[in-house]
Amino acid sequence: MSLSDRTLADVGEFRLIEEITDGLTLGPDVMIGPGDDGAVLAVDSPLVCSVDLLVENVHFKTDWSPAESVGRKAVAVNVADIEAMGATPTGLVVGFAAPGETPESWALDFARGLRAECETAGVSLVGGDVTRAAQIAISVTVLGSLDGRPPVRRDGARAGDLVAFRGRLGWAGAGWAVLGRGFRSPRAAVQAYQVPEPPYGQGRIAALAGASAMIDVSDGLLADLGHIARRSGVAIDLHRESFPIAEPLQAVAAATGSDPLGFVLTGGEDHALVATFAADSVPADWTVVGTVSAVGEGGPTITVDGSAWEGEQGWDHYA
Ligand SMILES: Nc1ncnc2c1ncn2[C@@H]1O[C@H](COP(=O)(O)OP(=O)(O)O)[C@@H](O)[C@H]1O
Ligand SMILES: Cc1ncc(C[n+]2csc(CCOP(=O)(O)OP(=O)(O)O)c2C)c(N)n1
Ligand SMILES: [Mg+2]
């Protein structure tokens, strides 16, 4: 058997852990990283903690996403939740489940992506777990620090606030639509599906600017702003003309005969940050796309130019 044919069953659990963790760089707050029964981080302010799972054939397919991109995505989608609280990520732990027949190279490429994205996001991989399973599943738990600031919650939007976002909207959804039809281009959309690019560092900036509520867009803008509207007890109206429609979205919409705004409003998985701000405090380079008002008779609503959005509403795992 050549080295490149090795599977996880050939490598074994402890060699695999060594391969994943060998030579990791750890941040200054990490007192104990991988290798003991628990990691130890030095924290002196309230801790933010969040977990998200990535399951094969639910969140990714091995023939749609190279292993390295799955590793990067696992970090990005989780760090985005920390950013959405207005915090800075500090450490993360990774649960990795995979069949024994999984090529060792898949696991190593996955680990390479994990480490690369941790570096990009400025977070340390401090531990994890490895187990055999019927399909690949990845669970990432990430910790974050507020550096003394109050968290930015989903329930703080107030009538008179503006709604603004930073990051990409609709790109990953367009990439998913392309892959689902058996195509591989436009590359930019497919790559956005494979690896989201949350606006790292902007959660803290939004918090410092006084964001009244914030969320990262995983299930789709309408769905995720719906959480802010319901929790805050407000209505949100989005303005169609204020959304930039990037070239790859126009290309996918033209090829699929759909409205590109559909991807922007209901495509998930780009993990843009969307937040509400007092009118004079929207941070630089955030795009204002809507307004917050008091709820009308029907309770909290999300509208686009005053009307409900017909058609797809966003992702729901059990819908
Ligand atoms: N199985 C669970 N047990 C406890 N809390 C959960 C569970 N699943 C989700 N939650 C909580 O419900 C909220 C919404 O979850 P989710 O929609 O996954 O948020 P996000 O899009 O930020 O990942 C989060 O605060 C999350 O911690
Ligand atoms: C193979 C595959 N099928 C379908 C999708 C689409 N999809 C899966 S999960 C999801 C939404 C985000 O995931 P979720 O687990 O709900 O993240 P959370 O809201 O908890 O952050 C979408 C749009 C995908 N990414 N890959
Ligand atoms: Mg979640």
Image (tube, rainbow, N blue to C red):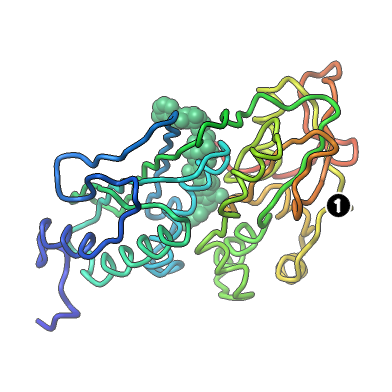
Rendered view: 74 above or below 300: below
Horizontal arrangement in the rendering, residue 311 relative to residue 186 (left or right): right
Residue 318 visible, this angle: no
Res 142 visible: yes
Q: Position of residue 144 (x, y in %)?
A: 44, 40
Name the quarter where the N terminus is drawn. bottom left
Front position in the image: 14 or 133? 14
Type of amino acid under label 1 = Ser
234 left or right of 64 in image: right
Q: Is residue 90 left or right of residue 283?
A: left
| Residue 182 position by quadrant | bottom right
Q: Which residue: 83% across, 25% down?
A: 159
Residue 289 screen position, x and y as percent: 82, 46
Furthest residue in direction bottom, as rendered = 2
Residue 254 image point, x, y percent: 77, 69
Q: Secondary structure at mark 1?
A: helix
Q: Where residue 243 sits in the image (x, y, percent)?
A: 81, 54
The residue depicted at 28 percent of the width and 49 percent of the height is: 126
Q: Quadrant of the C terminus?
A: top right
Q: Identify which residue, 51 or 255, lies in the foreground.
A: 51
Residue at which label 1 appears: 242
Q: Is residue 82 above or below residue 261?
A: above
Residue beneath the point at 40% across and 65% down: 116
Q: Nearer the viewer, residue 193 or 317?
A: 193
Query: Cβ(mark 1) to ligand 2 < 8 Å?
Result: no
Task: Please name the residue shown 68% across and 54% down the image.
Answer: 169
> In the picture shown, does residue 72 fall above or below 155?
below
